[in-house]
Image (cartoon, rainbow, N blue to C red):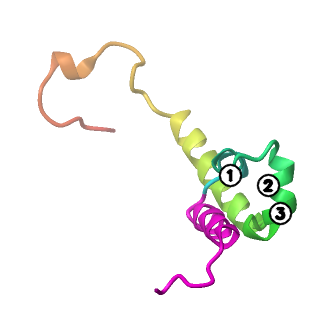
Amino acid sequence: MGLAGLTPHELRHTAASLAAAEGANVKAVQRMLGHASAAMTLDVYADLFEDDLDQVADRLDRAAGRTAANSVRTDGVGPDLDAVRSGPRRHA
């Protein structure tokens, strides 16, 4: 059998590794493994949750861009002009 020598601990670590690789946060992995705290999960599996500051910075930049774009949207402001006229909107 191809699983000879494979222990439950190795399967558990594999499950945690796959979850972290797919972007699961430490709280989700904590619950999945039944750990009492996220600190316990990080103590055992810290190597799976690398602190990638570049990725965090990229996500914050994208979020800031969406926020800036939303501040200039006109949807929901003023009369519903689409209900008054049909056809494509023209912007000056």
**Residue 49, percent from left and from top:** 74, 64
Question: Number of callouts in the render?
Answer: 3
Q: Which mark is residue 33?
A: 1
- At horizontal 61% and vertical 47% (from top left) the residue drawn is 63
Circle 1 packing at 10 Å, graded few (<14), some (14-19), many (20+), is: some
Badge 1 vs badge 2, beta-carbon distance below 8 Å: yes
Q: Secondary structure at mark 3?
A: helix
- Residue 28 image offset from top left, x and y in percent: 65, 47
The answer to whether marks 3 and 2 mark residues whose Cβ atoms lie closer than 8 Å is: yes
Residue 65 in the image, given as x and y percentages of width and height = 59, 49
Does 80 appear above or below 71?
above
* Closest to the observer, 84 or 25: 25
Q: Residue at x 65, y 62 (%)?
A: 16
Helix, strand or loop at label 2? It is helix
- Residue topped by disc 2: 41
Most common SS among magenta residues = helix
For the residue pair 12 and 64, the one nearer the viewer reads as 12
Q: Quadrant of residue 7?
A: bottom right
Q: Which mark is residue 44?
A: 3
| Furthest-left residue in this view | 86
What amino acid type should be assigned to the residue bearing mark 3?
Answer: Val
Q: Name the kind of residue labelled 2 in the image.
A: Thr
Give the vertical position of 87 relative to 29 (above or below): above
Q: Determine crowd level at label 2: few under 14, some 14-19, many 20+ residues with C-alpha closer than 10 A.
A: some
Name the kind of residue labelled 1 in the image.
Leu
Q: Rounded to the nearest whole Å, what is the CA distance between mark 1 and mark 3?
A: 11 Å
Q: Which residues are magenta?
A: 1-23
First-in-chain label (1 vs 2): 1
Is 84 left, or right, of 44 in this rendering?
left
**Magenta stretch contains residue 71:** no
Residue at image position (67%, 73%) is 10
Which quadrant of the view contains residue 82? Answer: top left
